Image (spheres, rainbow, N blue to C red):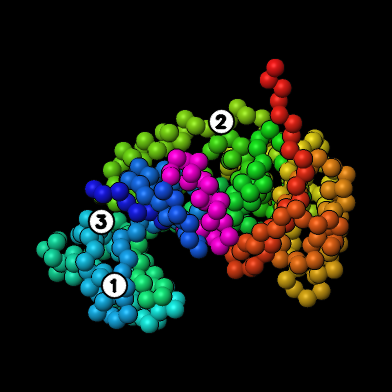
Amino acid sequence: MQPLQLIATTPMGTEAVVSRELKLLGYTDVTTQNGRVMFSGDFIDIARCNLWLRSADRILIKMGEFKATTFDELFEGTKALPWQDWIPADGEFPVQGRSHKSQLSSVPACQGIVKKAIVEKLKQTHHTEWFPEDGPRLVIEVHLLNDIAMLTIDTSGAGLHKRGYRKLVTEAPLKETLAAALVQLSRWGPHRPFYDPFCGSGTLLVEAAMIGWNIAPGLRRSFSAEHWPIVPAEVWNQAREEAFDLVKDDVPLQIAGSDIDPQAIEVAEAAVRSAGFAKEIKLDVLPVSRVRLKGDYGCLITNPPYGERIGEQTEIERLIYSLGRVAAEVPTWSFFAITSTTSFEKHFNQKADKRRKLYNGRIETQFYQFLGPLPPRPDRS
């Protein structure tokens, strides 16, 4: 089989983070586009990337790409692809769709055409007129952009943010994939203290701990492609064994968090226990004004309340002011905050060294980065 064309889909603004993750995993032919990162691989790479990518949403197989300005072109282009290699006779293959700046703008109609074309192809190769669709699930997507149709199959199933450790959530939880991206953008490492004063569900804390111990984020869950006949079971066994061997759970961690809401801390404690970090992550019920950071060269990364409702903005500004006072007491620390509050720098009383536009769900935010000095390199003499 030829190398597979794989796509790691990403939240807008985190493409460079996922690209860097892939390069650290050893992939060299990495191409970045809006909302996705393209690379090539084999069956083992489907398994490894689902297990290891911290900030990607899904891993897709690109089946083909072609111009489609008419339904006939969409039908014939879809039918020409090798669906029979992937979809077994009992396979379930729902079709999802998106269309942007294309003549074929009716998504339901495009989905129906693609489904019909795949059925016709499978009739030829599986020699049957009836497909029960009660077997392995392979979700197909037709994505039309500027009259170019791209057909993909989703290997992940549930989104990769579903790690398995978070059973409960607070009112406005940060997705695990975005939390992991923020930690990676900070370049934090386990040799440095880590703190989140608005920890909510504890997601940033757990994602940092998983990075600190080099735990593959997908180790606790399963994926759609595990159930496909074409993908050998041994590649999943091999990828998981590799991941277990690479865990570094003897590395000391200095991770702590707090929140003024006792219920939020209860939710965070449940996530921390479920993730296996009950002894490593310290949690407190504490207002940000009473936070006192310990140690040098630490990283504070946080997702403060956004104040979406009328009348909340003054309280949000007060919290940011308190956070700025905490920062002023620890000159060797670096501070990072993701927020939709446009006056964050004013109330923090410091101009950010870097800003990055990110989307927290559908909310446009800025990731403010206040960079302290890096820790001195250890003396190797």
Question: In the displayed structure, does residue 263 sit left or right of residue 44?
Answer: right
- As measured in the structure, the alpha-carbon distance from the residue carrying label 2 to the one carrying label 3 is 37 Å
Residue that badge 3 annotates: 86
Q: Please name whichever residue, 209 or 337, is drawn nearer the observer in this view of the structure.
A: 337
Residue ID at (38%, 82%):
103
Tell me if residue 22 is in the magenta stretch. Answer: yes
On residue 248, which mark appears?
2
**Res. 337 image quadrant:** bottom right
Residue ID at (32%, 80%):
69
Residue ID at (77%, 55%):
352
Label 1 neighbourhood size at 10 Å, few (<14), some (14-19), many (20+)? many
On residue 302, which mark appears?
none
Residue that badge 1 annotates: 114
Question: In the displayed structure, does residue 179 sit left or right of residue 51?
Answer: right
Q: Locate residue 16, reporting x and y percent.
A: 55, 53
Q: Secondary structure at mark 2?
A: loop
- Residue 19 visible, this angle: yes
In the picture, the quarter occupied by the C terminus is: top right
**Amino acid at dot 1:** Val
Label 3 neighbourhood size at 10 Å, few (<14), some (14-19), many (20+)? some
Q: Locate residue 115, reporting x and y percent.
A: 28, 71
- As measured in the structure, the alpha-carbon distance from the residue carrying label 1 to the one carrying label 3 is 15 Å
Q: Secondary structure at mark 3?
A: loop
Q: Please name whichever residue, 220 or 42, is drawn nearer the observer in this view of the structure.
A: 42
**Amino acid at dot 2:** Lys
The boundaries of the magenta stretch are 8-28
Q: Is residue 189 above or below residue 129?
A: above
